[in-house]
Image (cartoon, rainbow, N blue to C red):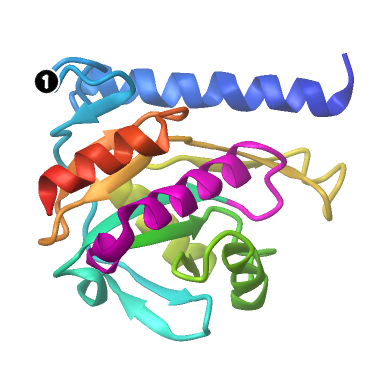
């Protein structure tokens, strides 16, 4: 088993453990329960809240800056080899598929790897998918705070062995936050753009 494959397996196991823990503690309900949609978990409580971060333009922003619109949130990192690019491609398809309604939704990518993901790196990353996607980074403390608020997981692996190209285990679901900044829906990894668009259209 090569090293990259081993780390990928570890990442998937870690994500599964986190999601299971959230379900068992009541932070997330079981998938497919409330709204019957495959890959969509609705109504999870106590997720989200205040944060202070730096966007991909180098501007300091808070949670208040995004209220008044729906907000799609994903936690990842720009060096991610697979999950993050896949989800950002989904975000881009959602925004493009919403057409004129896209202005009512802010897609947000929050890094769990702030040491490498500077505003400049984040800007290049999000713009490669759609310039309407907002990249957010910050200090280690700020990222720790927003991860805690969103019950998101992100932990570097093999960093000592490879301090430049290390991997980061992280959660892989996406949050849809309401106009009031409170959690509305959680989309599991692999939910199609069409399904997300259907959910968003119901909220607009």
Q: Residue at x 86, y 46 (%)?
A: 162
Give the extent of the magenta segment. 77-105
Name the quadrant containing residue 2. Answer: top right
Q: Mark 1: which secondary structure? A: loop
Q: Is residue 111 left or right of residue 166?
A: left
Q: In terms of depth relative to the viewer, which is nearer, 199 or 111?
A: 199
The answer to whether any part of residue 151 appears in the image is no
Total tally of numbered discs in the picture: 1
Q: Is residue 83 left or right of residue 145?
A: right
Q: Main secondary structure of the magenta part?
A: helix
Position of the C terminus, as image quadrant, is bottom left
Dot 1: within a 10 Å radius of its alpha carbon, few (fewer than 14), some, or many (20 or more) residues?
Answer: few
Q: Position of residue 122 (x, y in %)?
A: 60, 68
Q: Residue at x 24, y 62 (%)?
A: 101
Q: Position of residue 26 (x, y in %)?
A: 18, 24
Q: To which residue does mark 1 refer?
A: 34
Q: Position of residue 154 (x, y in %)?
A: 53, 43
Look at the picture and state if 1 lies above or below 178: above
The answer to whether any part of residue 65 appears in the image is yes
Q: Position of residue 1 (x, y in %)?
A: 87, 13
Look at the picture and state if 170 lies above or below 56: above
Q: Residue at x 21, y 46 (%)?
A: 200
Name the quadrant containing residue 175. Answer: top left
In the rendered structure, does residue 90 fall within the stretch colored magenta? yes
Q: Is residue 48 left or right of residue 159?
A: left
In the rendered structure, does residue 188 fall within the stretch colored magenta? no
Look at the picture and state if 104 lies above or below 165: below
């Amino acid at each position: 088993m090569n090293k990259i494959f081993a780390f990928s397996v570890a990442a998937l196991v870690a994500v599964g453990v986190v999601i299971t823990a959230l379900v068992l503690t009541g932070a997330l309900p079981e998938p497919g329960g409330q709204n019957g949609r495959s890959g969509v978990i609705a109504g999870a409580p106590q997720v989200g809240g205040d944060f202070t971060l730096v966007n991909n333009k180098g501007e300091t922003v808070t949670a208040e800056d995004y209220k008044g619109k729906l907000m799609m949130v994903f936690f990842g990192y720009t060096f991610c080899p697979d999950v993050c690019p896949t989800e950002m491609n989904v975000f881009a398809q959602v925004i493009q598929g919403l057409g004129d309604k896209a202005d009512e939704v802010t897609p947000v990518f929050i890094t769990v790897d702030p040491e490498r993901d500077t505003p400049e790196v984040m800007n290049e990353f999000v713009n490669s998918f759609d310039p309407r996607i907002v990249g957010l980074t910050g200090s280690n403390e700020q990222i720790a705070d927003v991860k805690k608020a969103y019950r998101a997981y992100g932990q570097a692996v093999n960093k000592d062995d490879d301090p430049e190209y290390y991997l980061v285990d992280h959660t892989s679901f996406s949050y849809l936050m309401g106009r009031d900044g409170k959690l509305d829906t959680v989309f599991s990894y692999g939910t199609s753009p069409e399904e997300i668009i259907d959910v968003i259209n119901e909220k607009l």
